[in-house]
Image (cartoon, helix red, strand yellow):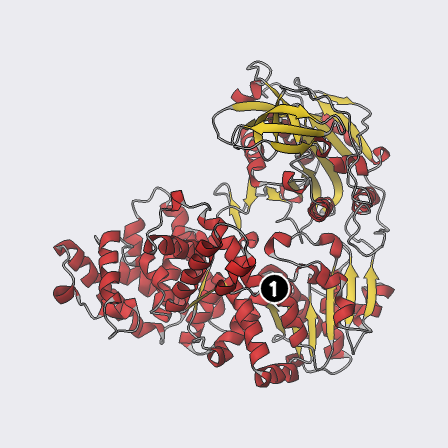
């Protein structure tokens, strides 16, 4: 890569030449923000003679950090520039200075799967049947995560949560924290929370870090949460040299506790901040920019600006309506087939959607047409069984208190150590105070005296103790790559995998793990810390960064299937966004909440601006679904997304895709159905009657009991899965009449014959 500063625009040059003081760069999609950050770092080093060790850059994903590091190295010829994710920086600081707040340096980082296993253990130890609890384990973990990000401790929950379950949630939260502490483990939220605690409690550490990192740069600042904002402020209080880059229009992670107001209110924290707007888009055609800009202009929570580009006008945006998801997928697949036949590579094409379940119809059709694809957001590399097993071996060798990793591998490969046997050992361990950690207790081989076990179980535990004892002596001496081989050999793991029908793929995954282990071998001298860093890197990989290929042809070019959330930061020549329907995009839960509606609009905006040359939007007039109880299926009439009414009709080519596979061009006008500036709802014509059977996007199937005489949009509905009737406003478009299924009409349930389909209609969309 040969980056040159002289190819920057005047506005970009103005941004990178800010040397001192706070600066906020509002960077629209495709405006070159990564180039600006890297060039700013290069300018500080090359022009202002700033020592690279005095610069700290932070972003949100490992991929973004790697890209930024590559650009910086190209511009500066410096290889050791401090570029971290928030979580990796937090892990580094806690390993170095965590003892000041009671954190041992060999702590384990629990990922989502580990956390789920902890919660299930909490339920078990509390003698609670998960099926009888008022919430799922995943829901409880989300609650705990929200509490941590708001700095709410378990003893404060009952004061803040006004519901029947607050005491129960508080108890589980406390038990969860105890389990983490006993395992010498932190979850993702803890990394940030405890780092904030460290900076707030130790002025000595804070002063030392501020003296070290005199210049702070933060990418994607609109995605920071309350604690990340606090960390950023604490690291830049003395010098005030904080340079943040972000875009409120691309803030789409509120469900992860992101605070878009951090960017909007930045000047309140740093008065006198210099604000620069990067409005020029270098990625997309004028046609695509026009669609995106018209849509996002309906949001209030944003900086006023207008995205523009010097690129060509390009093909007009396309909007196609199909009768059902199978026909929608057939249209998209045929269009992809046409595009590939006319020079586009599959890897230049992406199909995006609001929820993961929408991918299924696309997967089926792409397979039928023999078009290779990759599904982003499926099982991540670190979550593949063999990878998780090997990393768990590493974890307990580094941190003997890690009971979650221990429970995973004590019977892997199988050693006749059942869950019952493991519980007996845990129980015996809990009755003594001689040993520090369950693993050390097992290594003492206490079962002959204290625990009555079967001969097979005793033999298995003996074997496991011998394996771990041997490996513990090597974890501090051998590099990660060699340790992998030692674990495989001593545990006989590969022999265990031989009977697995997916053995070849699992073996390739292990080889990939070896390669990643080799990469770290030259960066850290001490083998023990190499192994610690090796495990940590995998723990800190965001699930959104992982790709699971749907077939084994790794070198084959593939179409990308991806959610709109996961698409952020990516770009493709051609983008299809499917499911432009009210209740799907925008999502049903946003229909009665202004702030959530604005976020849904931002999600849509992000998807559209991923496209460089062509953008296709599609929706269905009917969608097959189940009611909430899962007992009955029905076809639900779909209303077009209200976002389509917010984009001028002249910016689209609009068409219908018929049952026979024909494109029929039509003029479309969409009724506006939005919150206006006064938070009032525009009312649509109401065709509902008392006794109508209806379907709600959230509440499922119900019967209309009454319609208000004062406001005909107010419907009293008794839903099948709820005891009390609910008052529903039909103006939001979340309600539709139930239509009984006609097997012939909905032949997509049994698949469509596409063998005789023409694939040349696509030329009608070319300009």
* Residue occupying the point 72% across, 65% down: 2
Which residue is labeled 1 in the image?
66
Which one is nearer the viewer's eye here, 205 or 394? 205
Total labels: the figure holds 1
Q: Where is residue 327 in the image (x, y as percent from the top left)?
A: 63, 25
Residue 435 in the image: x percent, y percent? 26, 73
| Helix, strand or loop under label 1 | helix
Q: At x 64% / y 54%, what residue is drawn?
A: 254
State the quadrant of the N terminus: bottom right
- Classify 10 Å Cα crowding around label 1: few (below 14), some (14-19), many (20 and above): some
Q: Is residue 40 above or below residue 143?
A: below
Choose between 567 and 581: the one closer to the eye: 581
The quadrant in which residue 345 appears is: top right
Is 568 positioned to the left or the right of 460 in the image?
right
| Residue 460 x/y as whole percent | 19, 58
Q: Where is residue 685 in the image (x, y as percent from the top left)?
A: 77, 25
The answer to whether residue 4 is seen in the rendering is no
Q: Quadrant of residue 247?
A: bottom right
């Amino acid at each position: 890569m040969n980056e040159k500063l002289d190819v920057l625009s005047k506005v970009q040059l103005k941004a990178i030449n800010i040397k001192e003081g706070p600066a906020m760069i509002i960077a629209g999609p495709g405006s070159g923000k990564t180039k600006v950050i890297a060039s700013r770092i290069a300018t500080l080093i090359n022009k202002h003679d700033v020592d690279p060790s005095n610069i700290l850059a932070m972003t949100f994903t490992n991929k973004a950090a790697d890209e930024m590091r590559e650009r910086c190295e190209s511009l500066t010829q410096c290889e050791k520039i401090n570029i971290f994710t928030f979580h990796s920086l937090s892990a580094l600081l806690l390993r170095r200075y965590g003892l000041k707040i009671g954190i041992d340096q060999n702590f384990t980082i629990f990922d989502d799967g580990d956390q789920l296993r902890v919660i299930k253990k909490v339920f078990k130890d509390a003698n609670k049947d998960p099926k009888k609890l008022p919430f799922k384990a995943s829901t409880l973990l989300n609650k705990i995560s929200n509490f941590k990000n708001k700095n709410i401790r378990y003893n404060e929950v009952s004061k803040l949560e006004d519901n029947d379950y607050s005491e129960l949630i508080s108890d589980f939260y406390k038990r969860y924290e105890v389990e983490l502490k006993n395992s010498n483990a932190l979850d993702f939220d803890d990394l940030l929370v405890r780092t904030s605690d460290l900076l707030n409690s130790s002025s000595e550490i804070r002063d030392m870090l501020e003296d070290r990192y005199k210049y702070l740069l933060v990418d994607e600042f609109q995605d920071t949460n309350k604690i990340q904002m606090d960390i950023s402020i604490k690291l830049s209080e003395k010098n005030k040299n904080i340079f943040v880059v972000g875009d409120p229009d691309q803030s789409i992670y509120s469900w992860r506790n992101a605070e878009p107001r951090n960017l909007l209110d930045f000047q309140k924290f740093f008065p006198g901040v210099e604000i620069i707007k990067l409005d020029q888009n270098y990625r997309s055609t004028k046609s695509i920019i026009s669609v995106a800009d018209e849509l996002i202009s309906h949001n209030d929570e944003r900086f006023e600006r207008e995205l523009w580009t010097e690129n060509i006008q390009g093909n007009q945006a396309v909007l196609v309506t199909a009768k059902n998801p199978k026909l929608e997928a057939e249209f998209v697949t045929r269009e992809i087939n046409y595009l590939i036949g006319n020079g586009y590579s599959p890897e230049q094409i992406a199909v995006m959607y609001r929820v993961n379940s929408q991918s299924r119809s696309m997967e089926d059709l792409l397979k039928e047409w023999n078009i290779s694809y990759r599904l982003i957001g499926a099982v991540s590399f670190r979550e593949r069984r063999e990878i998780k097993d090997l990393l768990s071996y590493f974890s307990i060798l580094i941190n003997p208190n890690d009971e979650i990793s221990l429970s995973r591998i004590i019977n892997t490969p199988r050693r006749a150590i059942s869950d019952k046997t493991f519980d007996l050992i845990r129980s015996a361990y809990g009755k003594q105070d001689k040993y520090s950690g369950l693993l050390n207790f097992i290594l003492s081989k206490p079962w002959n005296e204290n625990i009555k076990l079967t001969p097979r179980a005793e033999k298995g535990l003996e074997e496991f103790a011998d394996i771990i004892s041997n490996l513990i002596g090597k974890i501090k001496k051998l590099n990660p790559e060699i340790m992998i081989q030692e674990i495989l050999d001593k545990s006989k793991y590969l022999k265990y995998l031989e009977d697995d029908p997916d053995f070849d793929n699992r073996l390739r995954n292990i080889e990939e793990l070896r390669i990643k282990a080799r990469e770290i071998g030259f960066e850290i001298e001490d083998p023990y810390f190499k192994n610690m860093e090796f495990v940590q890197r995998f723990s800190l990989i965001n699930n959104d960064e992982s790709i699971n290929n749907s077939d084994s042809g790794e070198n084959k070019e593939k179409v990308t299937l991806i959610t709109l959330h996961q698409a952020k930061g990516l770009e493709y020549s051609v983008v299809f966004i499917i499911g432009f329907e009210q209740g799907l995009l925008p999502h049903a839960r946003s229909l009665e909440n202004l702030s959530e509606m604005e976020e849904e609009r931002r999600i849509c905006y992000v998807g559209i601006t991923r496209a460089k040359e062509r953008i296709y939007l599609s929706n269905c007039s009917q969608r097959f679904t189940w009611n909430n109880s899962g007992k009955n299926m029905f076809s639900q009439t779909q209303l077009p997304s209200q976002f389509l009414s917010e984009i001028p009709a002249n910016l689209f080519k609009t068409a219908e895709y018929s049952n026979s596979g024909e494109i029929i061009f039509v003029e479309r006008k969409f009724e506006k159905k939005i919150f206006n500036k006064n938070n009032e709802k525009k009312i649509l014509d109401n065709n509902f009657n008392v006794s109508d059977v209806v379907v709600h996007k959230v509440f499922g199937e119900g019967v209309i009991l009454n319609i208000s005489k004062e406001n005909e949009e107010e419907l009293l509905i008794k839903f099948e899965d709820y005891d009390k009737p609910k008052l529903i406003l039909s103006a939001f478009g979340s309600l539709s009449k139930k239509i009984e299924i006609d097997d012939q009409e909905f032949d997509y349930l049994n698949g469509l014959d596409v063998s005789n389909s023409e694939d040349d209609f696509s030329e009608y969309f070319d300009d």
